[in-house]
Image: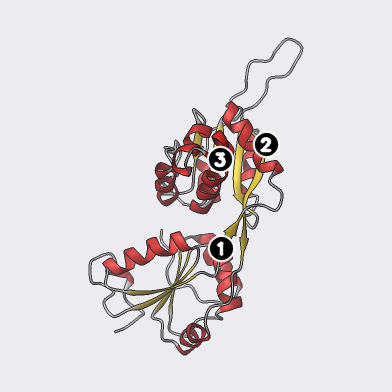
Amino acid sequence: MDPTTPAADATRPGALDGWQVLVPGAAEWGRRIAGLLADRGARTVLVPVVEVAPPDDLTCLDSALAALARGDYDWLVVTSPATVLSLSARVATLANRGRQTPSTALGTFVGETAVATLGPGCARVLERSGVTAALVPTGERSSAGLLAAFPEPPVAPPAAGTLGRAGRVLVARSDLASSTVSDGLTARGWQVDDVVAYRTITPDQPGARIRAQARAGEFDAVLLGAPSTVDALVELVGAPAAGTVLGCVGPRTARTATEQGLTVDVVPP
């Protein structure tokens, strides 16, 4: 087996027979990726190096969600499946004193507000919560790609003696996410409310056996799904051994990996 040459046909069943792949990350994302890898013959070792928790102070988030339920926003922007799940959990708590489930409550709060996200993976999670994304960039699946596809803000007709009001956008993100989307939309003329939907925390360290395997080169590949996962991998597991194929889901994750001194082999177009 040559771990440097799988990428050309890795989508066919059995293409990764015999491979052992380390997947650090949040549990739901990791399980989904593990299923895809299993379809191709790979054995996956999941390491939950990243977990999510509600914000320390829920005041800003709850205020924004109340405004969303009132229909105050033209757009809701979510940039990760974890954001969708965190919003769903929170609105289920707020809606009808918890009588709605997360799979129905988010749709109730979103109502007619248009929703934008970075890619089809996040769009599928939205659909499971009863929300259909109105904007999913077809080009680069990054903050820059989303900004390039985002429409210009409408300007409401001004009331007598006042200026017209530009459209409003709610950007929900993790505490570690960059402000690129919010800054870009603000520069375009949108009124943006930027709120933290969840905190990213580091769980207990993985077992010594997994750390030893990674450093000894026993994994054929490592898949990284977010910049925070890169940082957690280096901190808790260490850099993978030379020869390990390192895949990153997008350019931001790849940049973080490079900044950490890792060699990135695969970044999807």
Residue wearing tag 2 = 63
Which amino acid, mark 3? Answer: Val
Q: Earlier in the sequence, mark 3 or mark 2?
A: 2
Q: Secondary structure at mark 1?
A: strand
Q: Position of residue 153 (x, y in %)?
A: 59, 29
Q: Residue at x 55, y 79 (%)?
A: 237
Which amino acid, mark 1? Answer: Glu
Q: Position of residue 202 (x, y in %)?
A: 61, 68
Which image quarter holds the C terminus?
A: bottom left
Which amino acid, mark 2? Answer: Ser
Which image quarter holds the N terminus?
A: bottom left
Q: CA distance from mark 2 to mark 1?
A: 24 Å
Q: Residue at x 40, y 44 (%)?
A: 128
Residue at the far top: name it: 160
Q: Are marks 3 and 2 in contact (CB under 8 Å)?
A: no
Question: Is residue 226 shown above or below 105?
Answer: below
Of the two numbered discs 3 and 2 in the rendering, the one whose residue sits closer to the viewer:
3
Q: Earlier in the sequence, mark 2 or mark 1?
A: 1
